């Protein structure tokens, strides 16, 4: 029995390979977003310490989540124009 694969004209990849590549780039983008968010949280912590305000784990988590949400919204508005 012969098996046929749908291959893209431009990349010579099957649809499954294209889907895996898209997923891999999405995961690496999310990891990069979290790493940059941790850097922003670290800078926020230094700023809060200079002002004499406390900084604990809840503050770190809040800064990372807020940064990730804002950057995801900004990315979404630039990628999906109507």
Image (cartoon, rainbow, N blue to C red):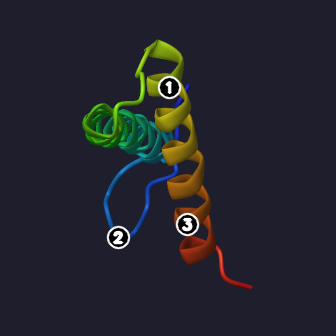
Q: Give the secondary structure at mark 1.
A: helix
Label 2 to label 3: alpha-carbon separation: 30 Å
Name the residue that disc number 3 marks. 74
Could you say whether the residue bearing mark 3 is in a helix, strand or loop? Answer: helix
Comparing 67 with 79, the one in front is: 67
Whether residue 39 is situated above or below residue 6 in the rendered picture: above
The residues tagged by marks 1 and 2 sit, at their Cα atoms, a distance apart of 47 Å
Percent of width and height locating residue 6: 52, 51
- Earlier-in-chain disc, 2 versus 3: 2
Residue drawn at x 45%, y 46% as measured from the top left: 22
Q: Is residue 16 left or right of residue 50?
A: right
Quick one: quadrant of the C terminus? bottom right
CB atoms at circles 2 and 3 under 8 Å apart?
A: no
Of labels 1 and 2, the one closer to you: 1
Q: Which sits earlier in the primary sequence, circle 1 or circle 3?
A: 1
Residue at the bottom extreme, as displayed: 82
Crowding near the residue tagged with mark 3, few <14, some 14–19, many ≥20 C-alpha atoms within 10 Å: few
Where is residue 27? Give x, y as percent. 42, 34
Position above or below: 49 against 11: above
State which quadrant residue 46 falls in: top left
Which residue is at 43% across, 38% downward?
30
Q: Nearer the viewer, residue 5 or 26?
A: 26
Question: Which residue, as the protein is rendered here, is positioned at the far right?
Answer: 82
């Amino acid at each position: 029995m012969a098996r046929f694969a749908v291959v893209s004209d431009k990349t010579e990849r099957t649809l499954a390979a294209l889907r895996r590549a898209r997923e891999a780039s999405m995961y690496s983008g999310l990891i990069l977003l979290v790493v940059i968010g941790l850097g922003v949280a670290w800078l926020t912590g230094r700023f809060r310490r200079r002002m004499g305000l406390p900084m604990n784990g809840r503050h770190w988590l809040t800064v990372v989540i807020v940064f990730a949400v804002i950057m995801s919204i900004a990315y979404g508005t630039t990628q999906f124009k109507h």
